[in-house]
Amino acid sequence: MNQLPWHAEHWARLQARRQRDALPHALLLCGAAGLGKRAFAERFMQGLLCKAPAGGDPCGHCRSCLLVAAGTHPDVISLSFGLRKDGVQRSEIVVDQIRELSARLAMSSQFGGWQVATIDPADAMNPAAANALLKTLEEPSAQTMLLLLADAPWRLPQTIRSRCQRIEFHLPAAVDALAWLQAEGVRDAAAALTAAGGNPGLARAWALEGALDRRLEVRKDLAALAAGRGQPVDVVKRWLDNEPAQRLWFAAQAVADEVKARSGESTGPLASAMDVEGLGHWYSAVNRTRESLRGPLRGDLLLLELLAQWR
């Protein structure tokens, strides 16, 4: 299977533990979205269930591999957002889902080998669900592997984190990330990598979806508002209709570039009338607003309050 270059060290360590028959019963795979931790988990799960793995990779031909590929392997359990009684998808993982998972894992493997359960995103478990998972983590069944995936592991209780072997995916070196993007045929690879904050997976996805144009639009919007042109209400509508969280990410980047330019005694890209302290406060407000978009508050009001402070 194709391996992302920055996965190699984690993969080698995990397979060395497998060779020593010293695998943990629970892994917490965490790090920023876009670094491939879900592909890593899938590859590890397939190799663990495969009847003839090579270097930890699945053969792709045995009965187990074929069933995994078809999504019908009886010893693979995937847990994510469920549906409410009215058919609407939940925004969190609830306690009943974890209880059902625990009951399933208490049963023997149907193929007599490993049972592998994936909880994704694990950081979406509500407090009751997280507490229910503790018993399974503290008293694991034999040959049971729990894979917890989290973009924001700090949202998980410490009691959960401490009972898992943590594999944390960090941003690769810029030169390695750029080389990978170029090998993948990404146009404007350097610009895409800058836009994604050094995250090659996001850079690739964003380059394909036209996010670089969106980044430029955000800078133009902020520069126009700083110059007294346009109305915040119009900008709010445009941002809210098209990737608002991503636009806030780009807004924070633009303000950071403005501050850097000021430190070099040059004019920033936004020509803001705010001083450096004010820019710092607005930068923090952007990130708080981006986080708040995940919650129940109205996005238009959040964005309007933010942009009303910009000048």
Image (cartoon, rainbow, N blue to C red):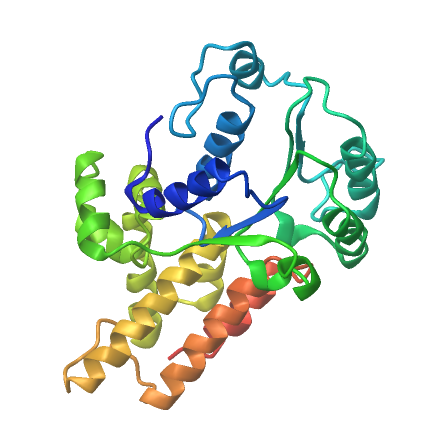
Residue nearest the observer in this picture, 142 or 149: 142
Q: Is 135 on the left-hand or right-hand side of 253?
A: right
Q: Quadrant of the C terminus?
A: bottom left
Q: Is residue 228 visible?
A: no
- Residue under the point 55% across and 64% down: 291
Vertical arrangement, residue 164 with respect to residue 157, above or below: above
Q: Quadrant of the N terminus?
A: top left
In which quarter of the view is residue 162 placed? Answer: bottom right
Residue nearest the observer in this picture, 75 or 182: 75
In which quarter of the view is residue 254 placed? Answer: bottom left
Residue nearest the observer in this picture, 251 or 166: 166
Q: Is residue 19 visible?
A: yes
Q: Is 204 on the left-hand or right-hand side of 168?
A: left
Q: Is 39 on the left-hand or right-hand side of 177?
A: right
Q: Residue 211, position in %: x, y?
A: 33, 47
Q: Residue 20, position in %: x, y?
A: 49, 40
